[in-house]
Amino acid sequence: MPIDKQSPFTLFAIDHVLSEEERAMQAVVRQFVDARVKPFVADWFETGDIPARELAVDLGNLGVMGMHLDGYGCAGTSAVAYGLACMELEAGDSGIRSLVSVQGSLAMYAIHAWGSEEQKQQWLPGMAAGTAIGCFGLTEADFGSNPAGMRTNAVRDGSDWVLNGSKMWITNGSVADLAVVWAQTDDGIRGFIVPSTAAGFTANTIKKKMSLRASVTSELVFENVRLPAEAMLPGVRGLKGPLSCLNEARFGIAFGVLGAARDCLQTAIDYSVDRVQFDRPIAGYQLTQKKLADMTLRLGTGTLLALHLGRLKDEHLLRPEQVSLGKLNNAQAALDIARECRSILGGNGITLEYPVIRHMNNLESVYTYEGTNEMHTLVIGEALTGLPAYR
């Protein structure tokens, strides 16, 4: 007799709170991931190599590069639609969602929000199409959670700028056509668009990673890189610029990690129904059902939180500390779900035949980047008490 079972999202009736258009867009991205990512991503992860430029064009054709931005070839979708796309992309792999979110929410958003009209016209259409890849240079080897301490600097030389320094853990760096780089200047922290062809600019691919292996991660080095005056983003000065971009990316992560968690949980449910021990499926034992029920609760509540934040963002009501709520809660929940699912799969849970260990390793990085768990905790603490506790 066939077993009657529901998916976690069906149990929560998630589709009920989505519009028909949102469901349709989510379905299109899911179909892309099922066809273009899932059959190949285990091999990409194992080899630590990914066809980034080919994928970027495919993702541009799909319409997800900068999809939540208006004009310049961008789709101009809602925040919720963008979040759902991130969810489906990360159900494939966190590295694929990272490629898209760094492109759209960091590099493209910086130019869209703070660039000149000439900069927007020059770069955004190609980036939306995926024919030009961007990266975002903020983090340094010694300055992650405290970007104000960055050592990368740009000094005026006549009408030009001369850029020196380095950036670390930069997604897309080695395949990028341009980098949006933040640097100390005599006018405070400013952003610069640095073409990858600029003399003195090198991008070194970081190897031997155990996480986000299906993603390009690099160190950027700038040695007397000469930039024209028009390379600077004119619309912002100080940390407001990069932090606004990070809030865009964190919003996408609050949705994205749930895709990885959903893929893990559905894999664990299916496996537990098929896996027989002591003459019955392990899904029929109380301990397994408690694990599945607890994970479903965390996945469902995290999804409802993300959707609520998306509705606020679409009404221009979302505050940075609320983004921290979503990133903190959902990244932790997703990592916990992946770890628990790994235990349900037993020895099979450590093989790339199943997606769980890959998602689990990836989520270790997602838990840390775009603001660590500790930093988002302190953002929320300051919002509640009015007292900063960063130092």
Image: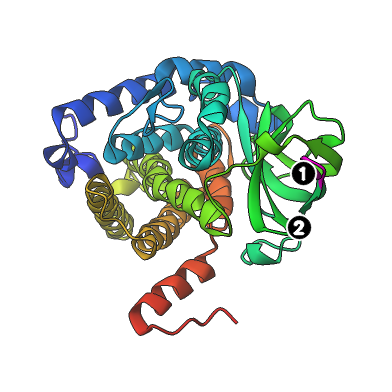
- Cα distance, mark 2 to mark 1? 9 Å
Toward which corner of the image does residue 159 lie, by quadrant? top right
Quadrant of the frame with the C terminus:
bottom right
Residue receiving disc 1:
219
Left or right placement of residue 26 versus residue 199 in this view:
left
Q: Residues within 10 Å of mark 2 (few under 14, many from 20)?
A: few
Q: Residue furthest left?
A: 16
Which circle's residue, 2 or 1, is located before the other in the chain?
Answer: 2
Magenta segment's dominant SS is strand
Q: Are marks 2 and 1 in contact (CB under 8 Å)?
A: yes
Number of marks present in the image shown: 2
Query: What is the three-letter code of the residue carrying label 2?
Result: Ala
Residues in magenta, as a range: 157-163
Secondary structure under the numbered disc 1 in the rendered image:
strand
Q: Is residue 289 above or below residue 277?
A: below
- The answer to whether one can see residue 51 in this image is no
Residue tagged 2: 141
Q: Quadrant of the N terminus?
A: top left
Residue at image position (42%, 57%) is 327
In this rendered view, identify the residue nearer to me: 92 or 130. 130
Is residue 160 covered in magenta? yes
Residue 301 locus on image (x, y percent): 25, 56
The crowding category of the residue bearing disc 1, from other C-alpha atoms within 10 Å (few below 14, some 14 to 19, many at least 20), is many
Judge from the rendering whether residue 281 lies leftward or rightward of residue 180; answer left or right. left
Q: Quadrant of residue 185?
A: bottom right
List x then y, in percent, for residue 17: 14, 42
Give the answer, above or below, for where 295 lies relative to 79.
below
Does 212 sit above or below residue 318? above
Find residue 276 and report its horizontal and vertical position in percent: 37, 41
